[in-house]
Amino acid sequence: MKTLLKVESLSKHYEGRRGLVGRLTGAPHTVVRAVNDVSFSVERGEILGLIGESGCGKSTLGRAILRLHEPTAGRVMFDSKEVTALDAPALKALRRRMQIIFQDPYASLNPRRTVAQIVGLPLRLHGLASSEAEARAITARICERVGLKANQLDRYPHQFSGGQRQRIGIARALVSNPEFIVCDEPVSALDVSIQAQIIALLLELKREMGLTYLFISHDISVIGYLADRVAVMYLGEIVEMGPVEAILARPRHPYTQSLMSAVPKVEASGRRARIRLTGDLPSPLHPPAGCKFHTRCPLALDICRSTAPLRETVGEGHIAACHRLGEDISLLEDGAA
Amino acid sequence: MSAPPAPALLVPEAPQKAESIFHRNLATFAANRLAMASAVVVVLFVLMAVLAPFVAPHDPNETDLFRRMQPPAWLPGGEWSYALGCDALGRDILSRIIYGARISIFIGTAVILVATSIGILAGLASGYLRGWVDVVISRIVDILLGFPYLIFAIGLMAMMGPGLWNIILALAYKEWVIPCRVVRGETLVTRELEYVEAARALGASRWHIMLREILPNILSPVIVVSTIRMAHVIILEASLSFLGLGVQPPTASWGSMVADGRAFILEAWWVSTFPGLAILLLVLAINVASQGLRDAFDPRFQE
C-alpha cells in the first residue's frame, strides 16, 4: 500500500483577542491549542478512525488537513504534494481530490439551492462537465448511487429527512471523483437505524470508488466496525494509534481504556467495570502541564504532572504516549491495578 | 387581488414537488389579511402615481384664482369636480396629491434601491472578508450613524442645491448604512455555517460564496428592512420638501403641499390636511405590509 496522506507535526492554534489594556501592556495572546503537534499517515484505500470526545480537536484536525482552517504549523502531504504550501489555484485544483462530509446534515446544505444545484456545484467549479446536460446526467447518476431518486433532484433540502440529507452531502462530496474524504462524524446526528444504512453506504462507496477515509467519530463502536486503524485524540494530541484489532483487544493508554469501558457489551459475564473519568475535559486555553491526561487519569503519578510522555512503539504499528506503558496495566480486566 | 388558495400551498410535503422557501413564505404572507390589504393600498398608490395623467381630474399646476382656497366638495362652496378643494393658487388638491405620489414613490424606491445595493455589497464584503475591509467599512458606518439623519440630509441639500437627483443622493448617502449593518450581521452568522464551509471545501471563490451561497440566505431580512425603511425615506423626503429643500415648485410634492397650506391652516385646513393624510396612509400601509413580510420571511418569526 502507498501512503496517500501524511500529516507531519500539524498544529492549529487559535489566538484569543486581547483587549485594549492587554495590547497596550503587551500582554501575551491567550492561545487555544486545538491541535498540537499531530503526526500520522493514511495509506491509500485505508480507513483511519479518529476518535475522541467533543472538544478534543478532532474536527479541527480534519479541517486543518483540508486547509479549511489554515494550520498554524506543520505539513500536510497529499499524494506527495505539500498541501500546506500550495497557492490558491493549486489548492482549488486539489480540492477536487480531497473532500469532506459534514456532521450536521441540516447545516451543511444551502437551504436556498436545489439538490441538483448543490450536488452539481463541484462539476461547475472545476469544469468537470462540458455542458449543463452532462452535469445534470452526472449529478443524477451519483444521486441515484447514494440512494436518492432522479425525480427528487429539483427539490430543496428542507423537503428531505436527515438521512436523505446526509446522502445529498455524500453525493456532493463524491461527484468530483475524489480520492480522499474526511468524514467528520457523518452519522452522529442521525438515528441509529439510519446510521447503519449510511455506514453501509460509505463502505460500499469506498470499495467501488477506491476511496480513502479519515473517519472522525466519538463513537468507538462505529470506529471499531469500519476502521482499519484507529487514532485516539485527547486535548489536541494523539495519545494512542494502531491497528483496530490491537486497539480493541488491548488498548494501552489509560484514556483509550476508559473509552473502551464505556462501550456497552452484550455478554453473560460481560459486566466489566466502567472506568469513570472524573471532571471535565480541561480547557484547551489552560491545558495541564506534563501529560495532558493526568488531571483525569486514575494511574497518574508525579512524573505525569511534570513531564509530557513520549510516543513509544508498543506493538506492530501501535504507538502510545504514557509514562506507565512499561508496567502494562490494564484497567479493563477485573481486579487489575 | 384576492388571496390565492393558500391551504394547497401550505401543505408541508407536497409529494415530489419542488417547493422553494420563497414560495412557502409568499403563501404565508398571502394568508395574512391585514398585510395583504396594506399591500393592496400600496399597489393602488403606485398605480395612481404611474397613471397620474389619466386619473388626475385636472392639470396639477393649473391655477385658477377664482377657486382660491375653494373648500372640499362636501362643504358649502365646494363642488365635486374639485373633490378635495383648491389651494391658495386655486390648484386642484386631489390632482396635486395624485401627481405628488410620483415624487414620493419614485424617490422612496430610488433611494432604497441605491442604498440597498450599496449596503448589500458593503455588508457582504465587511462580514465575509473581515480584516481591514471590515474595519474601514464599519468605521464609516459608525461615523455616518453618528449624524442625525435629517440634519445630515439638510446639510447635503444645502451644499448640492435642491433637485430630484440631489434628494436621492442626499438620502442614499446615509441610508445604505442600514442595509449594510443588517447584511454584515447576517453574513457574520451565515459564513460560519457548514454549507459555506462545504462550498469552500469544494473550491468555490469568494465571489461565489458571497453572492450565491450567503446572499440568497440573508435576503429575507434585507427585503423586510428595506420596505420598512422605504416608509422612513418617504417621510424624510416630505420633510425636506416641507423645509423647501426638496423638489422645487411648481412640481407637486406632498411635503411642500403641507408647507404651502401651513399659513392658512385655520381658514383653509384642507390645503395641508389632505396631502398630510396621503403621507400618513402610504407610510402606514407600507409599514403594515412590511410587518407582514417580516412575519412571513424572517425565520425568527416563524414557529
Image: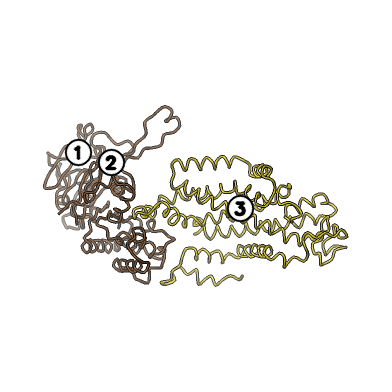
- Which is nearer the eye, A34 or A288? A34
Residue lying at 59% horizontally and 48% vertically, measured from the top left:
B175
Respond whether the residues carrying marks 3 and 1 are from the same subunit. no
Q: Confirm or deny contact between disc 3 and disc 1 (CB under 8 A).
A: no
Q: Chain of mark 1?
A: A
Residue A11 circle label: 2
Which shade is chain A? brown
Whole-percent x, y for residue A271 in the image: 19, 53
In this rendering, position of residue B209 left or right of residue A7: right
In this rendering, position of residue A122 left or right of residue A45: right
Quadrant the N terminus of chain A occupies: bottom left
- For label 1, the crowd category at 10 Å Cα-Cα, with few meaning under 14, some 14 to 19 and many 20 or more, is some
- Which is nearer the eye, A254 or B100? B100
Q: Is residue A184 visible?
A: no
Residue matched to label 1: A299
Which secondary structure, mark 3? helix
Residue matched to label 3: B111
The tag earlier along the polypeptide, 2 or 1, is 2
Q: Confirm or deny contact between disc 3 and disc 2 (CB under 8 A).
A: no
Q: What amino acid does circle 2 point to?
A: Ser
Which secondary structure, mark 2? strand
Residue lying at 72% horizontally and 68% vertically, measured from the top left:
B54
> What letter labels the chain drawn in yellow?
B
Respond whether the residues carrying marks 3 and 2 are from the same subunit. no
